[in-house]
């Protein structure tokens, strides 16, 4: 029994590493670390900074998004219904909660490096989220600083 | 020394599993298993069946394609120069050699399942490559059979 438990534990560990690698690869391919800035009258300075981790897929691959959501234990899957000539709806796995981004998404990609040019987007994204966690976006100086960081061609 | 070798071996194994997972994830996101049919006067029946495994990336992520090529130890990276209004050239990692597809690409994705809807493309692709390895595409019946298999919406 002990031996079979050991094998099973090793199998789980191997599957976990493959899954971690898969999430990084899928994010390199289909993921997006975005920082948007919206006008929002309810905030102090009239603007809202909106960092978001998103992975988009067609309906046929909804299961792939569900696997990612299950792994991160946060975020939501939204549907983008299509009424144009496309044949399938789009689904978006989104993590928007700033604490989920700080505590779950960012540490994951810090431990498991992206291997495409998206690593640069991630670094910018991570800096913005950390500034927001420190509430710097609520001051005029901090807000300008974030705009400057986020205003790159690759975000 | 033995101990450090053990740790190093385990680290390599972990990195290998992460890399395997990453290639599967990146392929789920950006890869393509395609079967094209061309007119080609030099072949017996005037047609050529052309299975190809392709991963495409912009210039900024050329390194990601080099990693995949290094892993599979086959295939080539081609450049699609862009003269339109896009700002970067596209690169395509392609495996076209039928024996490389049979001996390297297909066994890899058989051992490490795709997790998106591309698994269906892969299954069709794999059937076509196996038929071609058995030279069935050189008979009229086999050629028609391959056309029927490959003529799916998702390829």
Image (tube, coloured by chain):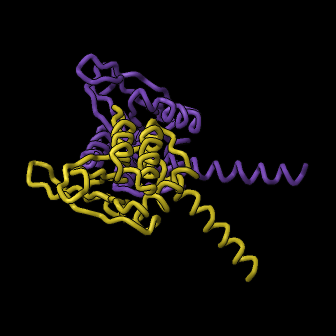
Chain colours: A yellow, B purple
- List x then y, in percent, for residue A61: 32, 58
User: Is B49 situated above or below B114?
Assistant: above
Q: Is residue B17 left or right of residue A88?
A: right
Q: Residue furthest top?
A: B83
Identify which residue is drawn at 30% across, 35% down: B36
Q: Nearer the viewer, residue A121 or A93?
A: A121
Q: Residue furthest right?
A: B1
Identify which residue is drawn at 63% across, 65% down: A13
User: Is B30 situated above or below B42?
Assistant: below
- List x then y, in percent, for residue A134: 45, 55
Q: Is residue B151 left or right of residue A108?
A: left
Name the quadrant of the C terminus of chain B. Answer: top left
Identify which residue is drawn at 45% across, 64% down: A72
Query: Residue B67, located in which quarter of the rendered image?
Result: top right
Identify which residue is drawn at 43% across, 41% down: A124
- List x then y, in percent, for residue B3: 87, 54
Q: Is residue A41 left or right of residue B73?
A: left
Q: Is residue A42 visible?
A: yes
- List x then y, in percent, for residue A40: 19, 54
User: Is B45 situated above or below A100?
Assistant: above
Q: Is residue A30 visible?
A: no
Query: Residue B116, located in which quarter of the rendered image?
Result: bottom left
């Amino acid at each position: 029994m002990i031996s079979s438990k050991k094998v099973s534990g090793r199998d789980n560990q191997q599957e976990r590493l493959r899954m971690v690698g898969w999430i990084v690869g899928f994010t390199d391919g289909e993921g997006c670390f975005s920082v948007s800035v919206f006008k929002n009258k309810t905030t102090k300075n009239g603007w809202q900074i909106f960092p978001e981790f998103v992975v988009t897929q067609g309906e046929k691959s909804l299961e792939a998004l569900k696997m990612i959501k299950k792994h991160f234990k946060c975020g939501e899957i939204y549907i983008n219904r299509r009424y144009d000539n496309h044949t399938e709806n789009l689904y978006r796995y989104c993590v928007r909660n700033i604490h989920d981004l700080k505590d779950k998404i960012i540490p994951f990609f810090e431990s498991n490096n992206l291997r495409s040019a998206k690593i640069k987007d991630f670094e910018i994204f991570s800096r913005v989220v950390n500034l927001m966690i420190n509430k710097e976006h609520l001051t005029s100086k901090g807000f300008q600083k974030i705009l400057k960081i986020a205003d790159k061609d690759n975000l």
